[in-house]
Amino acid sequence: MTVATFLIALLGAMALGAPIAFSLLICAVAMMVQMNMFDAGILAQNLMEGANNYPLMAVPFFMLTGELMNAGGLSQRIVEVADALVGHVRGGLGYVGVIACVIVGSISGSAVADTAAVAALLIPMMRNAKYNVPTSAGLIAAAGCIAPVIPPGIPLVILGVTTGLSITKLFLAGIFPGLMMAVVLAATWWIVARKEFKGSRKQRFDLKRLLKALRDGVWALVLPFVIIGGMKAGVFTPTEAASVAVYYSFIAGAFIYRELDLRKVPYLALAALKTSSCIMFLVACAMVSAWLITVADIPSQVVAMLDPFMGSPILLMFVIMLIVIVVGTALDITPTILILGPILVPVVKQAGIDPIYFGVLFIMNNAIGLLTPPVGTVLNVVAGVSKEKLDNVVKGVWPFLLAETLLMFLLVLFPALVLVPMKWLS
């Protein structure tokens, strides 16, 4: 009965048009009433405790890092390095996009912000080079979805906060799957480009140009190693790493590259604050529901529902991934994590599945959901930046969406592809 109350209240509130955050609160109130334990004081206390969370402070810092990178010229220099490295090959700008998304994503961890930055820089270049723009936009959108998986992916932080998993372990476990996503996208682009590529940049590899790009971009390229290396060495926590990234990107943009206008910094901080406040309020509301999910012992009820699959971890993972794919078509990444994370993590623990491994695949699945209509947040962003119709971008993204989905199920079928590198890095 509690599971039914949870689903009916949540889905009913969303169907009536209530924002996700308020839908979660309504769901919490309905569960409290159903369990005959309604107390406004408990509701308020859990709401405050949900926002008063030290690891969650990493979110606004990484958001601000992304804003400073784009305004300070760091993102542009990362693209220039990638262009000098592989821009001369057939369909080279596609590979540039994948490399740039990996590097930019490993600094700020926001799929939407990173994709918008890379798309704004590359898609005009692709259009001028006579690339198929919808296909190019689809590639950039798919590559932008690597950001949530590799450190310091903001969704990894949110999952860690709401489920109690180690954020540092999630970060380290996400490195190899994120790089595999990049390799798979590059391979898919190679196949697609052979059929659809119509233009030529008419340039050759220039070692001097590459060395110059590396020299100019070294300050931007070092930042991912500072973040990941510092956490791996235990020098700072993920939240401290986020603050280091802010200071680093500010100094590099303002005093090394001298492209960051100091008068714009308050506006950049305000933009990061607006996005972060939405995420943090969502998390706070979700923590109320998460507490009630624990009190009502909903995970045990879900375990009973999934009991036919509990004996086979791989089969259980397949079933869960299919459920998340369906949910991801209707919900954005953050609400999906907040709603399903507290329910599914105890389930996989009871089935003997490594929760960190599950967490990375869960985030990968949610990242792929950013490409699936009708929500498809990243698709909408790329369509807006490229000035292409959303329908055209949807057609262009299908080969890359399929490739990432197949990779995800390959990692479900062969857990060692994630578990072994995770042990190397831990």
Image (tube, rainbow, N blue to C red):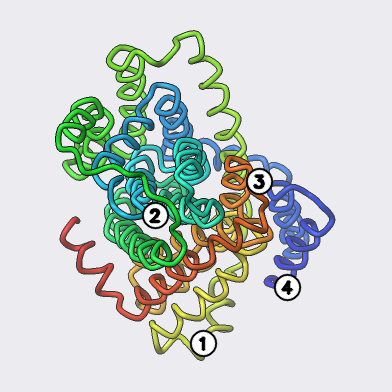
Q: CA distance from mark 1 to mark 4?
A: 18 Å
Identified by mark 1, the residue type is Asp
Q: Which residue is nearer to you in this view: 113 or 62? A: 113
Residue position for label 1: 307
Residue position for label 3: 42
The label nearer to you, 1 versus 2, is: 2
Query: Which is more N-terminal, label 2 or label 4?
Result: 4
Numbered mark located on residue 4 in the image: 4
Q: Which residue is nearer to you in this view: 297 or 4? A: 4
Q: Where does residue 282 sit, x and y in percent of width and height?
A: 62, 44
Identified by mark 3, the residue type is Ile
Query: Which is more N-terminal, label 3 or label 4?
Result: 4
Residue position for label 2: 149
Disc 3 + disc 2, Cβ < 8 Å: no
The label nearer to you, 4 versus 3, is: 4
Identified by mark 4, the residue type is Ala
